[in-house]
Image (tube, rainbow, N blue to C red):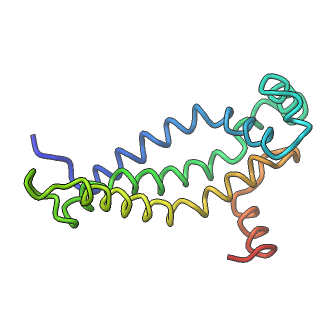
Amino acid sequence: AAAPGLLQQVGMAGGAAVITVTFIHPVDVVKTRIQISSEYGALGMVGSTKKIIGGEGFTALWKGVNAAWLREASYTSLRLGLYEPCKVAFGCTTPETTTFVKKFAAGSAAGALGSLAGNPFDVLKTKMMASEAAGTPSIVGTAKELLSKQGL
């Protein structure tokens, strides 16, 4: 069978990451609250989870999941999907020409491109997860607020 093409590699990496983040996101919400608040920190994981659900509802555990999906769809898709093309670009075409340094450079390049694309969504995700307001914050509203208050 032929090796998957670039779009297929990027799509598979992003799809797997989006599925994974959907299930792990509630833990990330609780972790973020504990990190930014001494009140939540004193409650620990179980106490913080109960406080979030009791005060904001069960769905609050998925606040910011849409930004997390965008982050994973960009960051992980590019980081994993571009590794093989970057290896080829750095000259890793045969076992004889493939060195650790070249593979390291290819991984660094793919990771850097993924980080550039994913970082804005990571900031949005964290801001949305930290929100204790009732209801789910809007990703567009959160982006506008961040842009107006903090700029690029």
Question: Left or right: where does residue 26 sit relative to residue 38?
Answer: left
Q: Position of residue 39 (x, y in %)?
A: 92, 37
Q: Position of residue 60 (x, y in %)?
A: 77, 37
Image quarter of the N terminus: top left
Q: Nearer the viewer, residue 75 or 37?
A: 37
Please name the residue shown 85% across and 35% down the image: 41
Q: Nearer the viewer, residue 72 or 109?
A: 109
Question: Left or right: where does residue 142 sit relative to residue 105?
Answer: right
Q: Is residue 15 above or below residue 67?
A: above
Q: Is residue 115 above or below residue 66?
A: below
Location of residue 110 by image quarter: bottom left
Location of residue 106 by image quarter: bottom left
Please name the residue shown 79% across and 22% down the image: 46
Q: Position of residue 84 (x, y in %)?
A: 25, 54
Q: Position of residue 42 (x, y in %)?
A: 89, 31
Question: Left or right: where does residue 18 sit relative to residue 123?
Answer: left
Image quarter of the C terminus: bottom right
Please name the residue shown 85% across and 24% down the image: 47
Please name the residue shown 62% across and 49% down the image: 66
| Tally of marks | 0
Location of residue 150 by image quarter: bottom right
Question: Left or right: where does residue 142 sit relative to residue 89?
Answer: right
Q: Is residue 55 above or below residue 142?
A: above
